Amino acid sequence: MNRREAVTHVAWILGGVFSAPTLQAMSRWEQIGSQASALRQSGSFLTETQHEIMARVAELIIPRTDTPGAIDAGVPDFMEVMLRDCYRKPAQDTFLAGVGELEQKGFLKLSPDQQTTTLKQVEAETQKTSDSSFWLITKELTLLGYYTSEVGVKASFDYQPIPGRFEAIKIKPGQKDFMYGNQA
Amino acid sequence: MNLNIKADKAQTYDAIVVGSGMTGGWAAKELTEKGLKVLVVERGYELKHVEDYKTAMKDPWEFEHRGKIPIVAAEEHYATMYFSAKEGSQYLYSNDKENPYIQKRPFNWIRAYHTGGKSLLWGKHTYRWNREDFLANAKQGLGVDWPIRYDDLIPWYNYVEKFVGISGQAEGLAVLPDSNFLPPMAMTAPEIHLKKSVAQKLNRPITIGRVAHLTKPQPWHTAVGRASCQFRNRCSRGCPFGAYFSSLAATIPAARQTNRLTIVHNAIVKEIILDDKAQKAKGVRVIDQNTLEVREFYAKLIFLNAGTIGSTSILMNSKSARFPNGLGNDSDQLGRNLMDHHLAIGARADIEGFEDDYFFGARPGSLYIPRFRNWGNDKRDYLRGFGYQGGASRADWSRGATETGFGADFKKKMTQPGPWKINLSGFGEVLPNPNNRFYLSEDQKDKWGLPQIVFDADFGENERAMRKDIMNDGAEMLEAAGFKNVVPYDNPVAHMGLGIHEMGTARMGKDPKTSVLNKFNQVHACKNVFVTDGSAMTSASNVNPSLTYMALTARAASYAVEQLKAGSL
């Protein structure tokens, strides 16, 4: 039984009905597994299940709408690279504990609405503390991964890699944020 | 023997300049333009202008970590981590693990061992010192008196400013003398509001930052291949337009145009070769950083521009019977009076309103609030003062990480400009103190067999007393503008080195007993060695120092060539 069948099967048991976008989303989760990206080298940071959980979480944070979503932008693999390369062990442990909790809750077997509710709970708990948390790291990485990706930048912003001038202006209705590239 | 003489001839120049950074570039330009055959000795690798700015044109998604620094790299670049070394700019910073140093007290020694040196890292804020800056030591009986005054530097400020190209607004302020300006950069609407409020309620002027960017290139800028600023604010990766001033973009090309410039790379100066009898330098002995081969170069004139710590440590390493404690160290001041600017302190706030105001372009600069403490009728219980840099901008998508929410609406919201926010960041003057110093380790060597540097310096009572005002005054100005959620901050990380303005370790002075250099940056007791980088500074002011280093260098080069021609060196 592949992942989609498994999820559908669970949904059927729960008496859920999937909307077209959710089915589409599931097709894309399928692709995650098959797209063994060059970035996911040996010594992956997450197990396959954890990776799937995080792909689902990222897609709930930045879903595909009329513009691409987190999975389209390659956020799940990016997250893993960043966790492996750019976070120290305490932060990695915090993150893994958070994924572990979602795993224990059978996150992937929940309906999309239940998943959203679960994440709202995680978010609410996070607001009680100012420390780095699973939710903060997840959001940081999802946003960074999406809003600096090629599809994310081009779909979201008025990208101006060479503005050529600097001037104060009045904003126009519907003005998207200008993006000049990460000044790194 | 004959072979040797031939070899010596081939390695003989009119002048040797050690270092190719901010002041080394200027020394090379001035000396070659005055007809000298110059060898620039650079300890680092060759970095070519434009073609080696390998990240300059990359889009955000082309960086594997999207601009963040991996942990492993961060550990190897520990000195720069508080700073702006990011994935796109890290290649310009030296690896601290390969170039270790010893911190008896915390010190961040930030280096850029390649052509252009730290002129590729600088913040580009460019200010003249004021009259009082040169008088303060004498008036307050601190350190030693400067052997020069503001008037001595005016012609040289004028001279270097035109070549550098400084964007700014003339204000006619005694505390912050005007430079020769290219058109100023614009302020955003909340910044204009702050400027008006602070002028009205607190009687403090705010100007747009004076920065070394070409807003309107002049013929002498385009003549060396420089072009207009494109407002990308990706300066830290190297500017492919040559729009901000660096030695790679400006002074080295000018020196090359004379056909009298030679640059040797990977050559670490081990010591200055001395003719003890004549009390003169003959040349330099260098170690190839890759092959460890030792070579010698000879010249009648030597300019040390290796950066403050670099130049001073070369003097320390140049020992002889006449100078057992290092060249020119009769005063025991070498390595002492280490100064920087203290920072990582200020105030920030949220700004309500101005939703209809926006800006186009990424401005590589900020506001500048000149010193107002201990100025005019203001008297504090500490000495000297501070200025601020900072500005207002609208939050971008990254605000979303700490905002509540996720999902489709949240995603859309992140594509709109966020609320305005503002930050004012203080830069305070550090006093000269002979116990703030660095010295050479007696037992720890680097991989080239040279002694490691030991840093033993920290801020003192005066700096700490000033910091309270930097925070409170910053908050007061933001409140005067009616901004919300004003947060004064003082980052405990603050210690020396973080300003990347290390200076003072071979100071200028009138008396050889208490200083290393004279009023023309000559080593008192070794007249053909000039030191014109930050080492020479007798005090620190609170403004960014590069412009003053450049003016001192041009002035010293002019004097050195006169002396050389008169046969006095």
Image (tube, coloured by chain):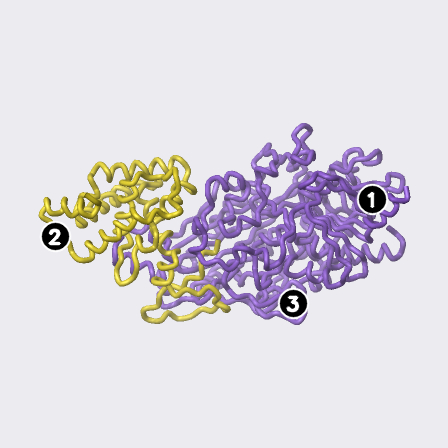
Alpha carbon separation for disc pair 2 and 3: 68 Å
- The image quadrant that residue B497 belongs to is top right
Amino acid type at image mark 3: His
Q: Which residue is mark 3?
A: B221
Residue B201: x, y in percent?
A: 46, 61
Is residue B525 depicted above or below B478 in this figure?
above
- Evaluate whether residue B426 shows in this view: yes
Q: Residue at x 56, y 60 (%)?
A: B239
Secondary structure at badge 3 equals helix
- The image quadrant that residue B333 belongs to is top right
Amino acid type at image mark 2: Val
Q: Which mark is residue B281?
A: 1
Protein chain holding label 3: B
Q: Is residue B425 left or right of residue A53?
A: right
Letter of the yellow chain: A
Q: Is residue B521 left or right of residue B9?
A: left
Alpha carbon separation for disc pair 1 and 2: 88 Å
Q: Which residue is mark 2?
A: A17
